[in-house]
Amino acid sequence: MIRIFAFLFAVLLAVQPANAACRGADFRDHLPPSEKTWLARQMAATPYSTGNHWIARKGGQSLHIIGTMHSGDSRMARVMSRLRPIIAQADAVYFEVTRAEMRRVKDQVKERPEAFLLPSGRRLQQLMSPKTWEQFEIFAAMSNADMETIQRMQPWAVSLFLIPGGCRPFGFGLKRGLDDRIERFAIRKRIPLGGLETAATGFSALSRLPLRDQVRILEHEVAFLLSDAPENATAVEAYFDESVWQAFLLEPRIASQYIGVSSKELTRLDRAFYGNMLGWRNKLWVKTIQQIKGEQVVIAVGAAHLPGKEGLLNLLKQRGYSLERAAFN
């Protein structure tokens, strides 16, 4: 057990900053007309499907809801030049989780090992087919992973800690993303900081997924990484277009072209994953948001948390907030 804890600590500490903008392919540039029509229809049916900065007002309070990208990109400098005056006037700035709270992640491994590890006697190889296990061994060898330790970990933990972020707009510990820039600026201005959740909440959301779905997601991620698919920059480019939901809608349809799994099955898994990582957490967050004090507050969370019926904006609207889109970049 000590060895496993030590390995997880090492992985958590080894997450590196994103040093350059993604240079991969924006798949939206290569969609056939039928796909473009489908995508436009899906976006039109999604509440608040566009926009990275909204102002929610109720009872004299203004909440600046800012959709962020957690990984770094040089274009963030332009975004920050617009946001600094707003942040400087805020009574408080809230994030998904503060940097100080994220330092407690290693404590979660000690306090809740059952959330990270498979049940006693179970091994990851037993949960995967021979073909997908063979693929995973190839990937693990490239990552120099300790296979004995990996065998004991839940699939979601393997995916989170070992699958490279690449151009994906999420991930723990990535520096110079918009969250990081906002937090550093707020600290310099001595603006009070707060978190909408604890370090444990995100892990709880991931571990809520059925084990069989965790396995399938890990298998598909590895297959996609080992395929001939170009680096996927769709989410990054869609973020700066303020239409990041396009990337989430297209994700399973793109992957299905390269890994031999139907887009229907990949969409099912996406809905299960994001239902927990986005919808479930959003419902917890909105309860906290309603208790926040201050006339002007900045709330900076991943941009994917904003759109949709269970998105943060729609949940606030249902609770009596008026919403106005603001300029972003």
Image (cartoon, rainbow, N blue to C red):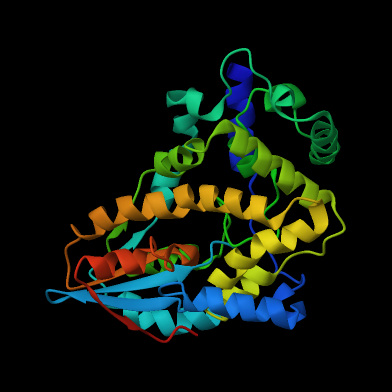
Residue 93 in which image quadrant: bottom left
Residue pictured at 40% horizontal, 55% vertical: 96
Residue pictured at 79% horizontal, 60% vertical: 257
Left or right, 215 with respect to 195, comes to right
Please determine whether, in this image, residue 59 is positioned above or below residue 169: below
Residue pictured at 69% horizontal, 76% vertical: 35
Which x, y percent locates residue 65?
A: 35, 71
Which x, y percent locates residue 98?
A: 39, 52
Residue 3 in which image quadrant: top right
Please determine whether, in this image, residue 183 is positioned above or below residue 55: above
Q: How many marks?
A: 0
In this view of the protein, can residue 115 be seen by the observer? yes
Which x, y percent locates residue 202?
A: 45, 44
Q: Nearer the viewer, residue 113 or 208?
A: 208
Which x, y percent locates residue 276?
A: 46, 47
Classify the position of the N terminus by image quarter: top right
Residue pictured at 37% horizontal, 85% vertical: 326
In this view of the protein, can residue 92 be seen by the observer? no
Q: Nearer the viewer, residue 80 or 132?
A: 132
Q: Nearer the viewer, residue 50 or 233?
A: 50
Please determine whether, in this image, residue 182 is positioned above or below residue 271: below
Residue 279 in which image quadrant: bottom left
Left or right, 264 with respect to 275, comes to right
Q: Identify the residue at the far top of this view.
A: 121
